[in-house]
Image: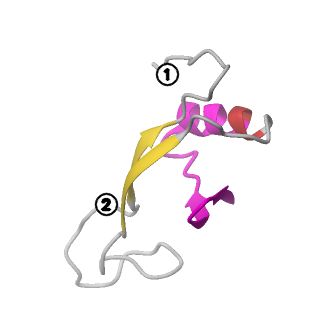
């Protein structure tokens, strides 16, 4: 599914990929239950390029690249111990 994080710069829409990263998705959903991500920091986001259509399907004859946008940051929420995902 797609979740939205309200930020001071607008809503950040994130499509979760449980088939690619099940533990990370589980942890993210657990954080969402707190209804607050104070302390979460996102410092880089890039689009997924022209290799994939709006539904996430690879465009025929396009070069291969990741089917996801790059998002870097931390989900270490203030006041909540960070659980290492292994």
Image point (50%, 81%), residue name: 54
Query: Is residue 84 something one can see in this rendering?
Result: yes
Q: Nearer the viewer, residue 7 or 17?
A: 7
Quadrant where the N terminus is found in the figure: bottom right
Image point (23%, 68%), residue name: 64
Label at residue 4: none
- Residue 15 in picture, x, y percent from top left: 58, 59
- The kind of secondary structure element at disc 2 is loop
Q: CA distance from mark 2 to mark 1?
A: 21 Å
Q: Quadrant of residue 25?
A: top right
Image point (48%, 72%), residue name: 56
Quadrant where the C terminus is found in the figure: top left
- Residue 18 in picture, x, y percent from top left: 58, 45
Q: Is residue 73 above or below residue 61?
A: above
Q: Nearer the viewer, residue 28 or 39?
A: 39
- How many callouts does the rendering have? 2
Q: Is residue 41 above or below residue 45?
A: above
| Left or right of 55 in this view: 2 | right
Q: Nearer the viewer, residue 29 or 53?
A: 29
- Residue 80 in picture, x, y percent from top left: 66, 19
Q: Which residue is mark 1?
A: 85
- Whether residue 3 is in magenta: the answer is yes
Q: Where are the magenta residues, as a range? A: 1-29
Q: Quadrant of residue 9?
A: bottom right
| Left or right of 34 in this view: 43 | left
Q: Nearer the viewer, mark 2 or mark 1?
A: 1
């Amino acid at each position: 599914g797609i979740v939205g994080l309200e930020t001071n710069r607008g809503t950040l829409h994130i499509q979760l990929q449980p088939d690619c990263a099940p533990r990370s998705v589980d942890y993210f959903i657990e954080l969402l239950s707190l209804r607050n991500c104070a302390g979460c920091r996102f410092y880089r986001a890039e689009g997924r390029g022209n290799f994939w259509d709006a539904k996430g399907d690879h465009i025929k004859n396009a070069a291969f690249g990741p089917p996801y946008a790059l998002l870097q940051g931390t989900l270490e929420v203030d006041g909540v111990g960070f659980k290492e995902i292994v």
